[in-house]
Amino acid sequence: MRTIIFALLSFVTFWVAPVSVTAKPVQPEIGKGWQEAVVHVADPAPWVAFFTEDASWKVASRGRIDPTILKSWNLAPTVTGTEVLLVNEGDSKGWIRLVTLKGIASEPIRPAAQAWDPGGWFSLMTRSRDATTVYKKAIARGWTAYSSPQEFSFGGVQLRNVVIRGPDGVNVSIYERLVPKLEGWETIKGISRVFNVMTMVKDFEAERAFFQEGLGFGAWFIGNYEDTIPVATNFGLPVNLSIQIPRRSGILWESQSEDGRVELMRFVGLEGVDHAPRANFTNRGIVALRLPVANLDAWVSKVRAKGIEVSTIGQPSRLAPYGRVKTAWVQSPNGGIVEAFEVLP
């Protein structure tokens, strides 16, 4: 009987009671890119286990999703949701917010997708000092990867990378810098905060224009990457095609920062299945990036002046650990959602 009561209490605590380690509302840093990634999952438990046990993150808060936020996502009043906020301890951004919705049918945004398939957000990009160990732990959980950890050079840096495939069509990319050794990033225990999010695109120029001309992002890098000899790649590209298929990339940032980046990629010459039509809050996967702004009304006006459709309801909502917020969201041609939010007094 005691076991049953304890299990019931644990269930209620996990799904209902807001539990926050933050004593006062957080004011996110503005102008340095997105703050957190919203990831819709069928069951948060496997993700909480991976990030707390293998990545050494922690649960910062958990509880019900404010119905006003669900309304702003254009969901029916009968839909309810719960959320778990995961953070790498010591980092004030690059967080992951797991959301689970009830009362609505959902499917993965990128079901059984190949790396070169466009549509939606592809991966959460992190750093590690030992990518191979984290990879092995994920494999032990029954997860998969596009390939085993692979080494390559980019921008004069020797890297090891693996893209882990978890539940719900969500990928986690883990980078380990080999030469020169990574400096700073003292908060890394297993894997770092998420510093970049990748999207595989059908129309590279349209996506670039959306972020640069539309949202005002700059570019750290735009160009092609090609292997000089046939090799296995971190994206599972056939070895013989690694020297034939350029990967056109754009690494974009709101300002010159290592964090809050967006990376566009297109496998030139490969036409994959387009998953963009499924990219919405209803379906599971990496759904949105939350971008803090100083003045939401001004941001909405500026973005609309660029010809971009903006969805907003104008009502404030509650969002832990920020407190009261106003939100609005836009969607790229490739299906990637960016949700701007202003923290209110």
Image: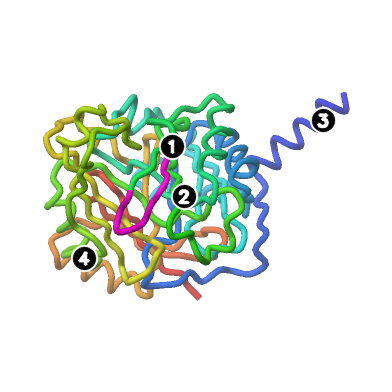
Local SS, label 4? helix
Residue 169 at x, y = what percent? 40, 32
Q: Determine which residue is flagged by label 2.
A: 176
Q: In which quarter of the view is residue 114 placed? A: top left
The quarter of the picture where residue 289 lies is: bottom left
Residues at discs 1 and 2 in contact (Cβ within 8 Å): yes
Q: Specify whether 304 is left or right of 139.
A: left
Q: Earlier in the sequence, mark 1 or mark 3?
A: 3
Distance CA(mark 2)–CA(mark 3): 45 Å
- Classify mark 3: helix, strand or loop: helix
The residue that label 4 is drawn on is 303
Residue 5: mark in rendering: 3
Indicate the secondary structure of the residue bearing disc 1.
Answer: loop
Assess disc 3: are there few (<14), some (14-19) or many (≥20) residues with their C-alpha within 10 Å of its C-alpha: few
Query: Which residue is identified by label 1?
Result: 149
29 or 163: nearer the eye? 163
Sequence-first tag of 2 and 4:
2
Q: CA distance from mark 1 to mark 4?
A: 40 Å
Quadrant into which the N terminus falls? top right
Q: Nearer the viewer, residue 263 or 65?
A: 263
